[in-house]
Structures are given as structure tokens and as C-alpha cells.
Amino acid sequence: MADDETRTFPGARPPDRSRRVSSSGLGLQVNEWGDPDAPILGLVHGGFDFSRTFDVFAPMLADAGWRVVAWDARGHGDSDHADLYSWGANLRDHLAVITSASDEPIVVVAHSKGASEMLELLAGRPAICKAFVDLDGLPSPFSAPDINDRERRRLRRADLAASLDRRRRRTELRRRPDTIEGLAARRAPMNPRLPREWLEYLVTVGARRDPDGWRWKIDPVLHLGGFGPWRPAWSMQNLASLSMPFLGVLSGVADEPMGWKSRPQDVEPFLPPGGRLEHFDDIGHFLHIEQPRRMADLVLEFLEPHR
């Protein structure tokens, strides 16, 4: 296939509007689908994703009568790169975008790492949200093997040293260029259940074309993992404290490399009063991309009373 800039994917639709929001001086890209006067639904992406990964899912929600507001995390997509990346900084960014969109509580649908961040934000600022849907962002204390304290300290030292070294070399770091097909192939191990046609489309909306090839628009300082001072057990404590209507969705494909691998029995004891949990053992971690219609119908059914 020729390496041009044109790729399409069934149902994919670019945002109807885009704008910028300042979060303590850092510019965040905000994309919107749907009637600007409709009720607001915030969409929060996961780690190493960006708001345009919702190009199929978001229009389905917008066509059902929602104003869908999605944003790129700092260092991702078209948001500014930052001198600091941390869990806390991401929480401040989420709050800046949500409060820029509405003075009233909105509904929020979040995926993976973004959902875990929203669990923490909503535990402290519940008044910004009137209903919350968590798409496979429920990392239970039992979803990863434990290690002894001595090994944990050693890993912490190694992680800190590697992170500081990357920050020191940030002016030297650049993402390796490639063709559209090449970048799609490099992302495929992270998204093994997604079709190559989708991954190539994603390159054209999530990467930039430089003279020497295509590069993902993600700060090269960032790397997989390294969430900072955070533990899965903290997310479960935040989940139990939620006061708004809650829907959690778990994927169940065991070999999905990006999934949390949490089981329903790990999460159910922590559900807030009236909270609902759905489990799909035939869908992978990127369930809103793998089966967008099925997930959109589930979300819309849950949110109908909160319109």
C-alpha cells in the first residue's frame, strides 16, 4: 500500500469541534462530538492513547444525544509536552478540562489508566460528576503477582534512576520514524486484537508526518509503566468511596498485554452502594474499540436516567 496520508475506518468520524484548555499554563487539546447544547459526557483515554482513539465510539454516543468532550493527556496527542509527568499532574489536567466545559456535574466515561485516575479525582471531587463509567480501569490488589519488599525497593531505585536519566536526555530523545504501515505494526503487540486497518487509521490521526517519516505524537520521555507513587489497592479504596451512580466494565481475555487482568470477585467487595459491574470474557482490554457498538449501547442504557 502506498504511504500516503489517507486512511479510513468504518464509522470513524473526526471531531466536530476542537479547542485548547490551559492547565496551569500547559495547553491541552480538547475534541468534541455532538450538539454543543446537549448534556455533556466526558471521555478519558488510557495510557499511551489519545482522544482520537474514540473516533468510532464517541460519534455513537454523540448521535444518541450527548455532547462528547474528550481530551489528550499531557504529552499525548496534540496536548503540550511537559517538564513534569505524574499521576497528580494528570488529575489536575482532568479537573481543568471538566470545569472548563461545565459548572454543573457531568457524566464521565473513562478507560484503563484514565479510569483509575478518575477514581482518585472523583474520590476527592465528587461534585464534578453525576455518573461514572469505568471501562477496564479497575486494577485490583490481586491482578498482578506480588514481590518481596527487598525486590520492590530495588525496582523502585531502578525505576527512579531510569526516569531521571530519560529526563536528563530529553533534548536528545526522538521517536523513531517509520511508514504508516510500520508504525501500525509496531503498535500491534500492544493492541493484538485490533485490526490492522484500525491501527493504520490511528497513525494518521495520532502521529505526525515529518520529512523522514511518521512519528507518534507522544513525548519520547514517556514510556510504558512508571505511574509514579501509586498502587492498585488505592484504586479499590477510591472505588468504595464513590457516591455517584457507577458502572464498571471488565474485560476477560487472559492474554491481553495491556489489561489489568482483574476478576469480578476481586472487584465486587469494593463496589460502592448501588454500583454495577459487567464482565465480558470475549472482549479484550480495548473493548470500546474492539466492540464499540456493544459498549456504546451498554453505556447509553446505564446513562439514560442521568441525561
Image: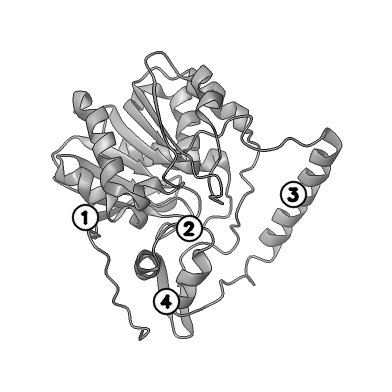
Q: Which residue is mark 1?
A: 17
**Counting other residues with Cα less than 10 Å from the Cα at mark 2, is it few (<14), some (14-19), or many (20 or more)?**
many
Q: CA distance from mark 4 to mark 1?
A: 26 Å
The mark lying in front, picked from 1 and 2, is 2
Q: Which residue is mark 4?
A: 180
The mark lying in front, picked from 4 and 1, is 4
Q: CA distance from mark 1 to mark 3?
A: 39 Å
The number of callouts visible is 4
Secondary structure at numbered mark 2? loop
Secondary structure at numbered mark 1? strand
- Give x and y (percent) for residue 254: 55, 44
Q: Amino acid at mark 1?
A: Arg
> Is residue 179 found left or right of 36 in the rendered image?
right
- Give x and y (percent) for residue 239: 49, 23
Q: Which residue is mark 3?
A: 160
The tag earlier along the polypeptide, 1 or 3, is 1
In contact (CB < 8 Å): disc 1 and disc 2 = no
| As drawn, 188 above or below 265 | below
The tag earlier along the polypeptide, 2 or 3, is 3
* Residue depicted at 60% across the width and 54% down the height: 224
The tag earlier along the polypeptide, 3 or 4, is 3
The mark lying in front, picked from 3 and 4, is 4
Q: CA distance from mark 2 to mark 4?
A: 16 Å
Q: Amino acid at mark 4?
A: Ile
Q: Which mark is residue 191?
A: 2
Q: Quadrant of residue 201?
A: bottom left
